[in-house]
Amino acid sequence: MFASAMKSARKIAEALKRERDVHIVTHIDADGISAGAIAKKSLEREGIENTIQFVKQLDDSTIEKIRNMGKVTWFTDLGSGVISKLDGIDYIIADHHMPDIEGGKRMLNWRHFNPHVYGIDGGKAISGAGLAYLIAISINKKNKDMADLAMVGASGDLQDAASCKFEGWNRNIIEIGKEEGILDVVRDLRMFGRHTRPLYKLLQYADDPFFPGLTGRESACLSFLRRIGIDKEERKWIELEYEEKKKVVSELVKLLITKGFGNSFSSRLVGEVCELKREKIGTELRDVKEYATLLNSTARYGYAEVGMRICMGDRDEYFKKATELLKNHRRNIVSGIQFVKKEGVQEYGMLQYFNAGNHIRDTVVGIIAGIILHSREGKNDAPIIGFANKEGGEIKASARTTAPLVNRGVDLSKAMQKVADRLGGTGGGHEMAAGATIPRGTEDEFLKMLDKEIRNQLT
């Protein structure tokens, strides 16, 4: 299937190379920014004029404005879900989300580059950035040097979450990146912050897996490290000696088993991590997880262009701005978690949920839902829904679930899309993480219908 996909990528590449001016439209998250940067850089290298637009979603108003521009439009990390509405636009789509079921023949058009068309799961096998990358290397082989951005996009969409490693077409990109000396994959601790967080903070904010008695408790993490003989807790994970790392992992596994968490949890502690060899060790850009978080911290606060400039190579002004935004992002995440802990998580049938109203930004409510799912406040055997108010008066619903539930048949993308459509909204995403925009006041009906969909998926 990969060979067939590359044939399509080459056809799209030839079409793009004939253009003089291309408008890029991409999503405002780590995958979207990475994808947009890959598209932009590949066009610039060919001397093709281009503009870029970052959007939360492709609603009717946004689509109409794009249509009125009259330009060839390259959609990255979105477009498939509204392909039936794109008549009148000369488009290229590089998107890994589930296509619009109303798309009909448009889904099989050569201009629509989507893994689902080939029977490949876009939630795990490749990201929007990965698809943009396959087109980019078909435009010019020198674009192989952007394999790092493709994997940042994959990490941003948690494509290694289910099996603790990257799968599918991502493996092809990794091999190219390794051959080019751009990246490497190693077996190591999978936790976020290996390069930048003090060891005790690494444990304090751990959520996959969650460590009972440690996660969320700074003093307990410090005591744990001292008890097992790890001194200088301010050190980063990458600064530990091999035997020290081995000791920490061993004790954490022992803790999980002692507390009744089985192998499915302890086995998630160590896995495949992707490192970017051109970036400095100890920075937010060396590990794809941290790079993706840095990009999210720009996009979700209206500064997507800052993230894109970093992807394009800036390590001065824009990188400094991004690190400032990252600090603000972390404060907002902590504030949001504290709000949910105070208000509590409610249960509704097979679901659990919280309604943040205006207390949490709609652009980060999904991140907080994911953290809560793996914390003491949440249940790891039920999908979680986070509601937040949007500026336009609508409600953002973000859903997260676990790999075991996905393996049992849960597909949040299909469920969210189906329920949102019935309520006059829009929805979609991936099996483990999906979102929807619904009319305000329909939250209860949404939960009722979604609970029914999830139950049907599990039977």
Image: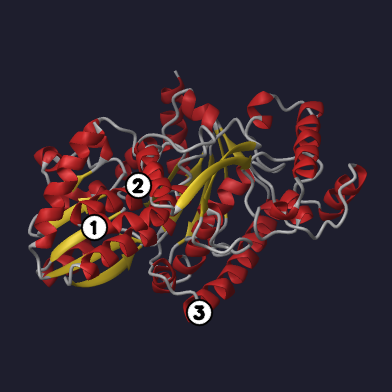
Q: Earlier in the sequence, mark 3 or mark 2?
A: 3
Residue 123 is situated, as x and y percent measured from the top left of the image, at 39, 39
Q: How far separated are the C-alphas under marks 1 and 2?
A: 18 Å
Q: Residue 427 — which label?
A: 2
Color style of the picture: secondary structure
User: Which residue is labeled 1 in the image?
Assistant: 75
Q: Secondary structure at mark 2?
A: strand
Amino acid at circle 3: Asp
Label 3: few (<14), some (14–19) or many (≥20) C-alpha neighbours in 10 Å: few
Q: Earlier in the sequence, mark 1 or mark 3?
A: 1
Q: Between tags 3 and 2, which lies in front?
A: 3
* Residue located 81% across and 35% down the image: 251
Q: How far separated are the C-alphas under marks 3 and 2?
A: 38 Å
User: Which residue is labeled 3 in the image?
Assistant: 316
Q: Secondary structure at mark 3?
A: loop
Q: Between tags 1 and 2, which lies in front?
A: 1
Q: Secondary structure at mark 1?
A: strand
* Residue located 50% across and 47% down the image: 184
Residue 418 is situated, as x and y percent measured from the top left of the image, at 32, 38
* Residue located 53% across and 62% down the image: 285
Tell me, yes or no, if residue 440 can be seen here: no
* Residue located 86% across and 57% down the image: 232
Amino acid at circle 1: Phe
